[in-house]
Image: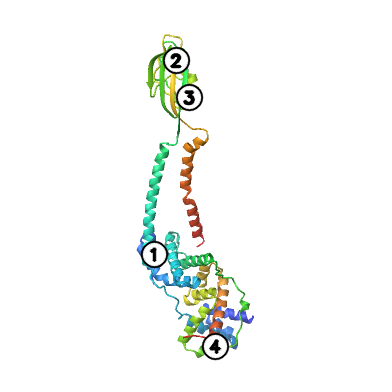
């Protein structure tokens, strides 16, 4: 773990090279966020760089009320959404009614029967098959371990919406993975 | 409580790690227990899912870009301040002023009158004053530069010149005759009326300066707007 505050103070005082510490710490997270939205390696790489450049340009305005990573995530998210819009595509985080979630029969045995490594691979495959917005919210919460509050800041949506979106996204992923397991619809 | 709400609560309670509350919720409810088990397995497994890693390190590239940007900005601000200084000097020396010459002839009626040095008329923006003194159409003396003359003796002239600039006449001596003739040639800066010529020569440069100074405004506004969206 880096001492984020002191690094940011150094950068604010003009030590540009210290910025590479923050870039190295967060570049993978920001890149994976960009990639899950724009779905193109080169575009994701460009947007990641742009997010870090914008963050640097405005670092003097950063008051450290939130984590630096949350701030860069938010910049990157906005860049990606604008990029998608410019391409004429839509990335929507519209809130959906939780009552649309189907209640399946008992399924825990399906999960328990499979080895952990296999399950992880199947979940990775399931993540590719769900909606982009569902994947994004699961990635932020369940893979990267961000808090509801942080996700709410990054995506500019209320915390209640984050919770309901996450609930729905998880249920969708669960259903997709269970389908993969049941149908054996998975190439190792 | 509806089944779907109960499942929603399980999600929340798992996130908040409230095991006791989960246990009380799923107690004696096989479907909820099953949901909890499968969900817990999935959420644990999700922690082991690897996300895409960045294919190349971008830190050096970004630092290089920042340093280049800094250099460019420094050069830009230097050239901008140089341009502004030049502009300031240009404005200071008013190259856009409109020059005009005017000739005024007046008669003075004093005999052997001496205008003393201590008296003078002050007006604004006169460049130069030339005085040629004629006595009975005979050339006597020509003076150029700053001269002085008593105000009350030059009322008519003063009225004419008052709006146009400084007039300082050192000394004019009258002759023995009743009337002497003084020719006064004045170069003065003037603020001309708006016409096509004056627009080209006078107002247009100021408009160009204003446009140059306002040029960065849309860029700054765009930047501000962009920044506000983050």
Q: Which residue is painted at 46% across and 51% down in the image? A: B216
Sequence-wise, the earlier of marks 3 and 2 is 3
What scheme was used to colour the molecule? Answer: rainbow
The subunit carrying tag 3 is: B
Identity of the residue furthest to the front in this view: B196
Helix, strand or loop at disc 4?
A: helix
Q: Nearer the viewer, residue B122 or B61?
A: B61
Report whether mark 3 lies on the same chain as mark 2. yes
Residue at label 1?
A: B62
Mark 3, residues whose alpha carbon is within 10 Å: few (<14), some, or many (≥20)? many
Q: Nearer the viewer, mark 3 or mark 2?
A: 2
Gap in angstroms between the C-alphas marked 1 and 4: 46 Å
Labelled pair 1, 4 in contact (Cβ < 8 Å): no
Gap in angstroms between the C-alphas marked 2 and 4: 120 Å
Residue at label 2?
A: B181
What label does residue B161 carry, if any? 3
Residue B29 visible to the viewer:
no
Q: Please tell me in which quadrant of the rendered image residue B70 appears.
A: bottom left
Identity of the residue furthest to the right in this view: B2
Task: Measuring from the top left, give residue B68's x and y in whole percent.
Answer: 37, 59
């Amino acid at each position: 773990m880096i001492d984020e505050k002191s690094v940011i103070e150094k950068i604010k005082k003009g030590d540009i090279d210290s910025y590479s510490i923050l870039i190295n710490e967060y570049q993978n997270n920001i890149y994976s966020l960009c990639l899950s939205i724009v779905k193109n390696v080169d575009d994701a790489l460009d947007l990641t760089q742009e997010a870090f450049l914008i963050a640097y340009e405005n670092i003097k305005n950063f008051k450290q009320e939130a984590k630096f990573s949350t701030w860069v995530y938010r910049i990157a998210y906005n860049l990606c959404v604008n990029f998608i819009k410019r391409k004429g595509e839509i990335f929507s985080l519209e809130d959906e009614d939780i009552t649309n979630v189907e209640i399946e029969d008992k399924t825990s045995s399906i999960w328990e029967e499979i080895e952990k490594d296999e399950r992880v691979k199947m979940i990775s495959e399931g993540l590719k098959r769900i909606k982009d917005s569902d994947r994004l919210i699961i990635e932020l919460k369940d893979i990267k371990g961000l808090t509801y509050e942080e996700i709410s800041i990054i995506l500019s949506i209320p915390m209640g919406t984050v919770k309901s979106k996450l609930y729905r996204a998880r249920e969708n992923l669960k259903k997709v993975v269970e389908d993969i397991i049941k149908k054996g619809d998975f190439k190792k | 409580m509806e089944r779907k709400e109960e499942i929603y609560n399980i999600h929340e309670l798992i996130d908040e790690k409230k095991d006791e509350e989960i246990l009380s919720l799923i107690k004696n409810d096989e479907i909820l227990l099953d949901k909890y088990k499968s969900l817990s397995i999935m959420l644990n497994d999700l922690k082991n899912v690897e996300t895409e890693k960045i294919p190349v390190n971008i830190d050096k590239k970004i630092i290089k870009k920042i340093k280049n940007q800094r250099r460019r900005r420094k050069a830009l601000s230097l050239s901008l301040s140089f341009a502004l200084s030049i502009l300031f000097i240009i404005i200071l020396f008013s190259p856009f002023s409109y020059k005009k010459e005017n000739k005024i002839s007046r008669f003075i009626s004093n005999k052997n009158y001496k205008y003393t040095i201590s008296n003078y008329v002050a007006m604004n923006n006169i460049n130069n004053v030339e005085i040629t003194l004629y006595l009975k159409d005979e050339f006597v003396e020509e003076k150029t530069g700053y001269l002085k003359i008593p105000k009350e003796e030059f009322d008519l002239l003063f009225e004419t010149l008052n709006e146009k600039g400084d007039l300082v006449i050192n000394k004019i001596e009258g002759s023995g005759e009743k009337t002497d003739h003084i020719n006064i040639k004045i170069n003065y800066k003037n603020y001309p009326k708006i016409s096509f010529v004056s627009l080209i020569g006078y107002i247009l440069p100021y408009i160009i300066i204003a446009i140059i100074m306002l040029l960065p405004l849309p860029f700054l506004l765009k930047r501000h707007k962009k920044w506000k969206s983050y």
